[in-house]
Amino acid sequence: MKNINETSEIREFKKDLQSGIINVYATLRKVNKSGTIRQIGFYYTKNNKLLTLNKLIHDVTEYKFNDKHNGLIIGGCGMDVAFKTLSTFYSLIGIKNHELAAKYNYL
């Protein structure tokens, strides 16, 4: 597991998420032919602006990022990979409420 240096960006995101003032969104960018690898983009809204979470999730989880499709490369099948990604990310930044990982929408 990676040792996370809690930046001001992470602190602000955690505070906003836990207070319910932001909404998180996932968008499926690409699925490989076998259906076992997906490229997903993650975003959140704050002050009526759509902001990306991709870099922050990539930095914390070390999931690979594909610039061409603007998405994180997530392996797995038979599961909700957006939930898995958010749950892993939240856990690594110290959010223990896994119900928050289920509170996202697809764009």
Image (cartoon, helix red, strand yellow):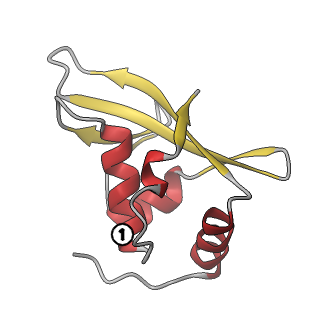
- Quadrant containing the C terminus is top right
For image coordinates 39% across by 60% down, the residue present is 98
The local secondary structure at tag 1 comes to helix
- Quadrant containing the N terminus is bottom left
For image coordinates 45% across by 58% down, the residue present is 57
Give amino acid for label 1: Ser
Mark 1 closeness class: few <14, some 14–19, many ≥20 residues within 10 Å: some
Q: Position of residue 87 (x, y in %)?
A: 36, 57
Q: Position of residue 64 (x, y in %)?
A: 32, 49
Q: What is the count of numbered marks?
A: 1
For image coordinates 30% across by 48% down, the residue present is 84
Picture quadrant of residue 99: bottom left
The residue nearer to you, when weighing 38 against 78, is: 78
Q: Position of residue 77 (x, y in %)?
A: 17, 30
Would you place residue 1 above or below residue 52 in this image? below
User: In the rendered image, is residue 32 in sight?
Assistant: yes
User: In the rendered image, is residue 64 in sight?
Assistant: no
Q: Which residue is mark 1?
A: 91
Would you place residue 19 above or below residue 21 in this image? below
For image coordinates 74% across by 58% down, the residue present is 21
Would you place residue 27 above or below residue 1 in this image? above
Picture quadrant of residue 37: top left
Q: Position of residue 79 (x, y in %)?
A: 22, 34
**In the image: residue 48, left or right of residue 94:** right
**In the image: residue 38, left or right of residue 44:** left
Would you place residue 91 above or below residue 58 in this image? below
